[in-house]
Amino acid sequence: MAGERNRILVLKEYIESKGITVNLCKNKARGNKGYFKYTSGGRFRIDVSCNLENDGIFGVLLHEFAHYIHYNYDKTLSSLDFVFQNVSDEILEELTGVTVNEIPKDFALSLVQKQEQLKREVNSLADTVRSFYPEMNLRDISKKLEKTLYNPVSYLLSYDKVRLFNRILSIENLEKDFNDLTPVQVAYIKLKSKQRALRRYSSKISRMNKYYNNPTELFARFTELFFSDYSKAKKIAPNAVNTMENVIEKGQISELKELSMLLK
């Protein structure tokens, strides 16, 4: 344990020697683990969450410092060419493999499962609505039905819950609060609610994919693994490791060279 704490302090001191402010045990660290930020006046900051054990702190410091390295060589953070020149499909696939391996499986699976469930519910409700007007398409049915819905129930076409003066309207109490609605109106309002929920989950999945596959995240996660668990990195991404070692040997990126000497 003492050895691990010492390794963290050595890495922290090295990072701070670059003019970067390092805040260990920062509750406001974004993403629950760590956060790298370029602040005004050319200053940099790394925050590390309080929710980590020592081995986690070390990895997060490496990860966030890798973002700093990336920024130093590519301020757009949009390319990997500064280290993997003309990155090959093979290396890109390896880097993606490293990243995918680090995605919290339960979190990702729960999102996908919820998305699939909502798709089924949307399709079922759409079929129910269409069954009342078999000669019309869903778009025309929507226009027809929305004209029949009065205020305040019409607010539930856009929101699952609405406060109206001292009254709260919600999808959950739809049929209780509005007992004069027809079955097709009820089905349509519920369809709109499920469609909104589906868009939210699809957006979350899209953002997750974009986050884990953007160049700066690919580089940071690979750098973290390279310096914290070399044998695992070599197994998952042999070509990327070989390229990184070549870059380090040639001193093309001074920070990587210094890290290799510091942590060997």
Image (cartoon, rainbow, N blue to C red):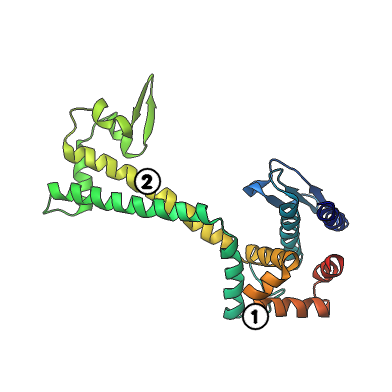
Query: Left or right: 169 with respect to 142?
Result: right
Residue 37: in sight, yes or no? no
Quarter residue 103 falls in: bottom right
Residue 250, position as x, y percentages in the image = 82, 80
Q: Residue at x 77, y 50 (%)?
A: 45
Residue 86: in sight, yes or no? yes
Read off the residue under disc 1: 86
Quadrant where the C terminus lies? bottom right
CB under 8 Å between callouts 2 and 1? Answer: no
Tell me the amino acid under the disc marked 2. Answer: Arg
Query: Left or right: 108 with respect to 5?
Result: left
Q: Residue at x 63, y 49 (%)?
A: 31
Q: Residues within 10 Å of mark 2 (few under 14, many from 20)?
A: some
* Mark closest to the chain's N terminus, 2 or 1: 1
Q: Residue at x 86, y 54 (%)?
A: 6
Among all residues in the image, which is located at the extreme left? 135
Among all residues in the image, which is located at the extreme top? 166
Q: Residue at x 70, y 45 (%)?
A: 49
- The numbered dot on residue 43 is none
Is residue 163 placed above or below 230 in the rendered structure? above
| Alpha-carbon span between mark 2 and mark 1 | 41 Å
Read off the residue under disc 2: 196
Query: Left or right: 24 with respect to 147?
Result: right
Among all residues in the image, which is located at the extreme front? 1
Between 254 and 50, the one nearer to me in the picture: 50
Residue 92, position as x, y percentages in the image = 59, 75
Q: Secondary structure at mark 2?
A: helix
Q: Secondary structure at mark 1?
A: loop
Total number of numbered discs in the rendering? 2
